[in-house]
Amino acid sequence: MTTKTEFLRLKRLISDAEALPKIIEGMKLNNSQRVRVLHKRDNAVLGAIKLIKRNEFLSKNCVEHLKDLDGLDYGMKRELLLESLYQAEKDFLTFDPTLGNPTVRNNGKNSVEWQLIHKEIAQVSKQKFEDGYYADSVFSAFREINVRIKVFYIRKTKKESDGSDLMFKFSAQILL
């Protein structure tokens, strides 16, 4: 097989692995749906192992991530699979830079991390992040934080302030 063919197979494995849900615990899956998700993950792991073994130039890190997966929870297995695939992709591109571009890691879509962010902040920044506008996403999030702090400060002190002056006054109010 050519390096290009192997690289395309790797890209497909990455796509398949990224499409897997981050967690399955707590998801409303019936037994057959759960088995299907686990089967897809296991197929991606087996495909990755076969691809790595066929291409000797891939680093040992690719194999290391896929060793001893027994006993790990679903989410950890998925993350290790992706790390192994991303490392293999990096090795492929080091071996032959003409193969293409690295995969943009898809950390934002359907991720549990967004549940940790206040819903109003996520509302103004999540879509921008998912669309790849990272700087705009961060700017929108901080603008929303600034607005929320401003409203809180005005309610508490009945005075208006903005910018760094507001942040210093707000932090002093919090510390008191």
Image (spheres, rainbow, N blue to C red):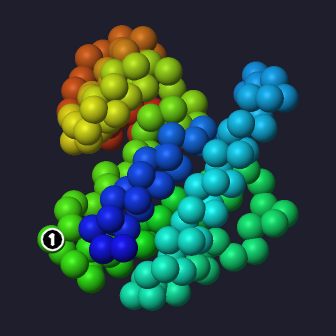
For mark 1, what is the residue? 98
Q: Residue at x 52, y 87 (%)?
A: 60
In the rendered structure, the answer to whether residue 36 lies left or right of residue 100 reads: right
The image quadrant where one finds the N terminus is bottom left
Q: Look at label 1 and name its amino acid.
A: Thr
Does residue 25 appear in the picture of this structure? no
Q: Residue furthest left?
A: 98
Expressed as whole percent of the image width and height from the top left, the position of residue 164 reads: 23, 39
Q: Residue at x 78, y 38 (%)?
A: 35
Q: In the figure, 39 relative to 3: above or below? A: above
Q: Between 111 and 169, which is closer to the camera in this rendering?
A: 111
Q: Between 86 and 54, which is closer to the camera in this rendering?
A: 54
Q: Residue at x 77, y 54 (%)?
A: 73
Does residue 107 appear in the picture of this structure? yes
Q: In the figure, 56 relative to 87: above or below? A: below
Expressed as whole percent of the image width and height from the top left, the position of residue 52 reads: 51, 76
| Disc 1 residue crowd, few under 14, some 14–19, many 20+, Cα 10 Å | few
